[in-house]
Image (tube, rainbow, N blue to C red):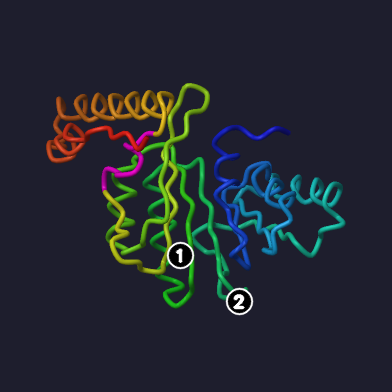
Amino acid sequence: MKLGKRLLRISELVSNDYTHIWDCCCDHGLLGARLLDQNLDAKIHFVDIVTHLIEELDKKLDTFYKHKSEKWQTHCLDVAKLPLAKYPGRHLVIIAGVGGDLCSDFVQKITRQHPHLTIDFILCPVHHLFTLRKSLNTLKLSLKNELLISENKRIYELIYVSSIEEEKAAVSPIGEHIWHYRDDLERKIAEQYLNKTISHYTRISQGNTDVSDILSAYQQVTLKSTR
């Protein structure tokens, strides 16, 4: 099956620097299969907590990737309980398609359970990006990359971070590079996403929840051309 823009862009970000890559909440395994096709040195781990999805995925992988059986493994388990310590080397954990709150919870538990491992994360949640970003900042994960992806009339943030602290690479609670654009299409996507985010927090502020600081921060964002 053809990958959508979101999963395709994630696959393009993955370098050959890893020993193990964990495709979490993998659903039908499209992203992991794409990574197998890229002939990376890493072993690809397909992770989902839904038993029948993993059973179906096992059959598909046995059919189409039996010749690469040493390069993949499936796991039916909670993402928060990834057995990273059993697999020596550098890890990349990819979490996409879940809410930002749950994504934040996963990252916190994984990093706290494995404080001495080198772990990178590529995260692409569907909601609550401010919550996730604040959490990544608190955990002192360093930013490697961030960008916006438009797919099926929705715009997603893609955040790439590392447990290796790097100078001047803190994760901004509202984003920084996602507001930079190289062409008219990127400007349009960033503008749409900013307006939608401001509208979202404006609606929340009209209720009983005080999000004035968050709303003010987004209202002060200025789009910047890198051309």
Q: Picture coordinates of residue 74 (x, y %)?
A: 70, 57
| Residue identified by numbered label 1 | 110
> Image height check: is 163 above or below 7?
below
- The quadrant of the rendering that contains the C terminus is top left
Query: Callout 1: 10 Å neighbours few (<14), some, many (20+)?
Result: some
Q: Residue at x 14, y 25 (%)?
A: 206
The foreground one among 131 and 169 is 169
Left or right: residue 111 compared with residue 70: left
Q: Number of labelled discs?
A: 2
Q: Which residue is mark 2?
A: 88
Asked whether residue 157 is drawn in magenta, I would say no
Q: Is 144 above or below relative to 221? A: below
For the residue carrying disc 2, how many other residues have a C-alpha within 10 Å: few (<14), some (14-19), or many (20+)?
Answer: few
For the residue pair 80 and 147, the one nearer the viewer reads as 147
Which label lies toward us, 2 or 1? 2
Expressed as whole percent of the image width and height from the top left, the position of residue 114 reads 46, 73
Residue most extreme to the front:
227
Which amino acid does the dot numbered 2 rest on? Pro
Nearer to the camera, 127 or 7: 7
Label at residue 91 = none
Dividing the picture into quadrants, the one containing residue 188 is top left
Q: Looking at numbered disc 1 in the image, what kind of residue is underneath it? A: Ile
Left or right of 205 in this view: 30: right
The reply to whether dot 2 and dot 1 touch (C-beta < 8 Å) is no
Residues shaded magenta: 173-181
- The secondary element bearing badge 2 is classed as loop
Q: Give the alpha-carbon distance from disc 2 to disc 1, as whole Å.
A: 15 Å
Residue occupying the point 16% across, 35% down = 220
